[in-house]
Amino acid sequence: MTTTPPALVPQVLLEAPLDKHRDAAPMQRQLHHRIKEAILDARLAPGSRLPGSRALAEALSISRNTVTAAYDLLAAEGYVQPDRQGTRVAALSRPARPRSARTTGNAPSAPVIAQRLAHIKPTTQPTVPRADGGVTLRPGVPALSHFPLAAWRRGVDRAIRRAGPAALGYGDPLGEPALRASIARHLGVARGVRCEPSQVIITEGAQEALALCVRLLSNPGDTAWVEDPGYRGAKAAMHAGDLRIVPMRVDADGLIATENDWQSQPPRLIYTTPSHQYPTGAVLTAARRLELIAQAQRHGAWIIEDDYDSEFRHAGESIGAMQGLVTQAPVLYVGTFSKTMFPSLRMGFLVLPEALAAEMQASLEEMLRGGHRYEQLALAEFIESGQFSRHLGRMRRLYRDRQQALREALTRHLLLPYVIEGGHCGLHLTVRLPARYPDRKIAEAARRYGIAPSPLSGFALCPMAGDNGLVLGYGNTSAELFAPLVHRLSQLIQAAEMS
């Protein structure tokens, strides 16, 4: 009987001694990694024999048990195959392992991604923080330092104590019943929304709610109307659903939809911010709201009403939601606590029409998973205890004062032609500028000073001559900073003027 002679130790395994420093990875892990990489790089050929555990241990000056453990793990992963004659390298179908550009001298090829992602492009660049670490005039950020963090922490602690370990498991896929009931009651009083708790779905912010609307009610290739200029996140959700997006212009009375629009490009979905259009601040008039609902019913379309910051009305009474105007209106109501509480809470909600909620319940329970249960329970108590309403009242007064201070700073320090739009609601002002002052160039220059206005043209899918200006957020910027910030902006605007 002949036996196969023992395999010599391949040079690839002896290239360098294993690191025996006490802070280094364990010997077994180092050896496992070395052999695996040699196999994947084809430096150890399929079918070749590995040296015996004793021979390799002696060559590397390590224990035989270490080699045996590494071989056992490689065998469990399928990289090697032990047999009566030793251990052989398994025959693997190896994918091409990319080499670095430094090795090849060529730039690495771009990965192939879904075509729909070509429509989703970043519109802003990172902002250099100010000396105090802050970023100012950024739209969409509430006054974070004014949130009652201590009260919120106590609420979360109470939720943990009361719910106990049971709330560590999966919850109701549609959200905690207590929170859904609290939201339904609050919306009925504060926004005129007609709904029962069974119609409320808790989401991870408004963005997930928008994506859910797309998944539930549209198919690839369907037409979606979006406000233009309008919220970029809505456009991203529509693009991700492979929808055909039709930009709908906005004027002082909100979204414009003509009879010709309904006949030539009827939509499946319509996205609108009727109570405070983002970013222009326009309010969709009652006549246009009713006409939009009537036409949607006639054409089998669904309206997505994003009511993102309507809680902060600065002049007059709060404008009610479109959802409550007509019984059984084809309106999906989207809201978020990112502005009324804080963004990192990542809590939003979607209110479905009653019949749709019943039809979709089984599908939603399969699609969704309950989570953030302690936070949801704490938020329900925050609402029911009255702390939420009191916090909104304080913030409403703060934002009203900050907006007035920003207006005064603009009057004194923005020494060039401009027009302010909106301002009756929310956390931002839109300042339109003459076309000779390119807004994207101004915003890029401002970011180097820790100032983060958004260029108005960046909100438009089809920018027009008047879509030039800056969207200035005042929610998270102290009033005493407005004068120097606007003075700096004025300098940057004039420096960006085109000849």
Image (cartoon, helix red, strand yellow):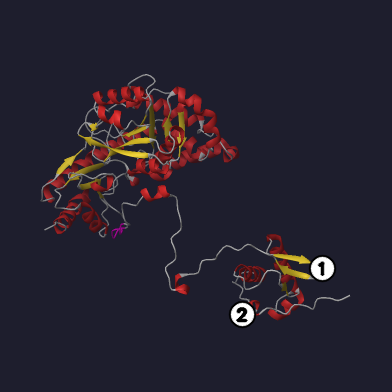
* Left or right for 143, reference 112: left
Q: Residue at x 41, y 25 (%)?
A: 185
Q: Quadrant of residue 423?
A: top left
According to the image, label 1 marks what residue?
Answer: 84
Locate the N terminus by quadrant. bottom right
User: Is disc 1 placed on a helix, strand or loop?
Assistant: loop
- Against 229, residue 315 (above or below) is above
Q: Position of residue 231 (x, y in %)?
A: 31, 41
Q: Position of residue 363 (x, y in %)?
A: 53, 32
Main structural element of the magenta stretch: helix, strand or loop?
A: loop
User: Is disc 2 placed on a helix, strand or loop?
Assistant: loop
Q: Which residues are magenta?
A: 127-132
According to the image, label 2 marks what residue?
Answer: 15
Q: Is residue 342 visible?
A: no
First in sequence: mark 2 vs mark 1: 2
Q: Nearer the viewer, residue 134 or 210?
A: 210
Locate the C terminus by quadrant. bottom left
Under mark 2, the amino acid is: Glu
Q: Position of residue 278 (x, y in %)?
A: 28, 39
| Extreme-right residue of the structure | 1
Q: Nearer the viewer, residue 139 or 209?
A: 209
